[in-house]
Structures are given as structure tokens and as C-alpha cells.
Image: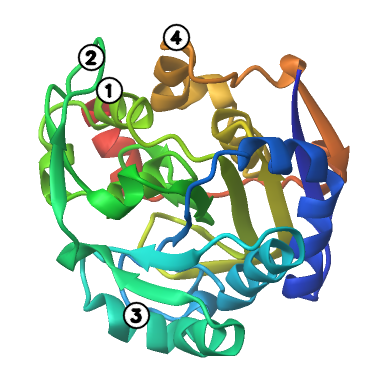
Amino acid sequence: MSTVAIVKGKQPIEATVRSLEMIESTVKKALSKKRPILVKPNYINSKPPSTGVTTDSRVIEGVVKFLRQHTTRDIVIGEGSGWADTFHAFKVAGVDAVAERWKVGLLDMNKDEFVEVEPQNPLSLKKVRVARTALESSIISVPKLKLHRIATVTLSLKNMMGALASKGSMHRGSLSKKIADLASVLKPCVSVVDGIIAGEGHEVSGNPVEMNLIIAGTDPLAVDAVGAAVMGIRPTHVKHLRLAEMKGLGTCNLDEITVLGEPVEAVKRKFQRSLSSKLLKYLS
């Protein structure tokens, strides 16, 4: 059984630390390899986190605070924005201040060295160029809790697209198959979903929904399944989750996931998808 923690609270730093403490033993095991740690948020653009589009810097700070209490490993906060200058996005969200307070590195992965890798048994993605830092680090994915026009949800697995040299190429062909393939190359060790101010409509629509939730676990597929369920979406209706499960990368079956803290039914809300989401569904 995979374990996922759900914490509700209006103090994001404390809620994040608490969520990780609830699964502390599995987090320590997941980060047991002597590798540096990459904290990977979602800054597709430079909109403030209050819009429901980008990761709240207070959640990132909670992750870093927990890590500082439990490891001496090198930590870097890294992202490769798709629609904005990454460091400008960091500044708008307040990530630069977090990095300064906790003396951790900041990295624009768009400017990293890229390495071509070949996913095993690919469904669609035969080759992909990935930031070397992501390949050589233990990854903590810190996505936003929000919907996506094509992929239905954009959570911890899809968040790995920020580490790619070419994000746009993922949308040519089946995005869902490519996300599942990418997960076999870049699988987060830990996932911490920022559901403080979530986003409905679609990934950059800026339709904020106050949820005050943190969802965390060491099986990113299970975390994404719980995140989807919290937004009122059946995990089995998210194609890239089903495909990733078929590839043996985790479980999206809620019956095989132990939820600690808040029950899904107590915190779920039916998120409204945009009209374009329905029209683009066949592209997934």
C-alpha cells in the first residue's frame, strides 16, 4: 500500500512540514541515496501563486525547512519555466527570498547542461534531452494542485516537463503517453502538492480556488491520484496516470492507497474544467 498524507491548514510552511513528518520514515528511505536534492516547483509562467497557477513559495520553504532538519545534503531549487524568465518567476513568487533565508541554491534549468536519454519501453517518447541536474539529483516535485486542458491534471509527474530542453515537443503526439515515458526517466522521490490556492479551469487560466491543502507522499503516482480525487476527478480518468501504472511506476488505484490526515471525501471539491479542456481531450 502506498501512503499519502493530506494536511489542511492556513499556515503553509507548518502544514508542509507536518505533511512530511507524517510520512517521515518513507521520506528518509526515498532520499537514502547520497545524491544532492532538487526541489522542483511549477513556474510555467511568472503569475503569483495567489492566481492558482504557480507554486506557493511558502510550501517550498516548508519542504526546505523539513530537509534542513533531517539531512545535510546539498539542496537546490530548480525550474525551467516554459513561458517566462525563470528567475523573474522565482522573484515574483518569493522563491529568491526563501533561497536566501535557507542558504540553498537557485537554478534555471533552461540554462543547465542537457543530456539525451532514452526511456525504456517507450509508448511514444523515444528520446528526450533532460537537464543534467535533474538526472543526477533526488527530486522532490512541488507542483500546484490544478487542472490541465489536455492532460486533465498537472501534478507531480507532469511537473517534470520543466527539466526538459524542449517542453513544446511533448505536446506533439500523445502528451499522456509522453508524460508516462518521462516518469520512467525522471521519477520524483517525494511529491508535495501545493493545494493552498489551487487552480480550476485550466493550467494558466488564473481561476483560484482556496483549498488550504498539502498532499504529500513518496509514490508520485499515488500522490497525483489523490490530488485528482481531491479535485473531483477519478484517477482512472487521467490517462497518463493509468499508463504510468501500467509501466509499473506506482499505483493510481485509490483502494491501494492509505491516506493519512484528512480523508479525501472531507476535503474534495468538484473543479470545473474549461470548455477548451473538453475539446482538447482527444489529444491526450
Q: CA distance from mark 3 to mark 1?
A: 29 Å
For badge 2, the amino acid type reads Leu
Is the residue under label 4 in contact with that under label 2 (CB below 8 Å)? no
Mark before the other along the chain sequence, 3 or 1: 3
Residue of label 3: 89
Is the residue under label 3 in contact with that under label 4 (CB below 8 Å)? no
Categorize mark 3 by other alpha carbons within 10 Å: few (<14), some (14-19), many (20+): many
Mark before the other along the chain sequence, 4 or 3: 3
Is the residue under label 2 in contact with that under label 1 (CB below 8 Å)? yes
For badge 1, the amino acid type reads Lys
In the rendered image, residue 135, in percent from the top left (x then y), is placed at 32, 43
Query: Which residue is rendered at x = 43% and y = 39% of the image?
Result: 157
Residue of label 2: 123
Mark before the other along the chain sequence, 1 or 2: 2
Categorize mark 2 by other alpha carbons within 10 Å: few (<14), some (14-19), many (20+): some
Q: Can residue 135 be seen from the camera position used here?
A: yes
Is the residue under label 4 in contact with that under label 1 (CB below 8 Å)? no
Q: Secondary structure at mark 4?
A: helix
Q: Is residue 80 above or below residue 163?
A: below
Residue of label 4: 246
Q: Is residue 118 above or below residue 106?
A: above
Q: CA distance from mark 1 to mark 4?
A: 11 Å
For badge 4, the amino acid type reads Met
